Amino acid sequence: MLAIFGVVLGVVLALVLKPEMPLWLQPYLPIMIVAALDALLGAWRAALEGTFSDRVFAVSFVSNVAIAALIVGLGDAIGVGSQLSTAVLVVLGIRIFTNAAGIRRKVLHA
């Protein structure tokens, strides 16, 4: 219940305060969102399988976002940012669809 309250509070605050994203962070935001979605779907799948750990989720969430941003930042620094962004999106996309398939199997028994 506390997590749901936190999400609702965050959405309301964002709608009321309308924070602006710094320009230097904007290219990294899509990659960070996809990395966070990967961690969330992995946690959901683990919960359905009975192997969920809040510590593993927290570490996975933070490290996925940080590593994805670091890889894209490194790519920007050496001039191949778009190629590394694509690579990160492909890898995380595969993981997201794998987790989604596992969730579907557990929920729908299909």
Image: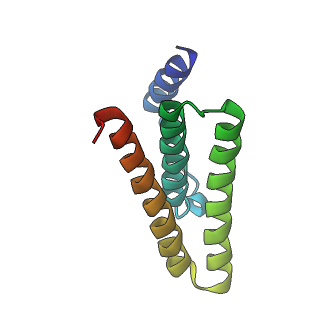
Q: Position of residue 9 (x, y in %)?
A: 51, 21
User: Does residue 80 sit above or below 18 in this rendering?
Assistant: below
User: Does residue 5 sit above or below 67 in this rendering?
Assistant: above
- Which residue is nearer to you in this view: 10 or 99? 99
Q: Residue at x 72, y 35 (%)?
A: 55
User: Does residue 33 sit above or below 46 in this rendering?
Assistant: below
Q: Give residue 78's quadrant in the image.
A: bottom right
Q: Residue at x 51, y 41 (%)?
A: 40
Q: Residue at x 51, y 17 (%)?
A: 5
Q: Residue pushed farthest top?
A: 1
Q: Position of residue 96 (x, y in %)?
A: 44, 53
Q: Residue pushed farthest front?
A: 109
Badge count: 0
Q: Residue pushed farthest bottom?
A: 79
**Colour option used:** rainbow
- Which residue is nearer to you in this view: 7 or 11? 7
User: Does residue 78 sit above or below 48 in this rendering?
Assistant: below
Q: Residue at x 39, y 41 (%)?
A: 103
Q: Position of residue 4 (x, y in %)?
A: 49, 20
- Image quarter of the C terminus: top left
Q: Position of residue 86 (x, y in %)?
A: 47, 74
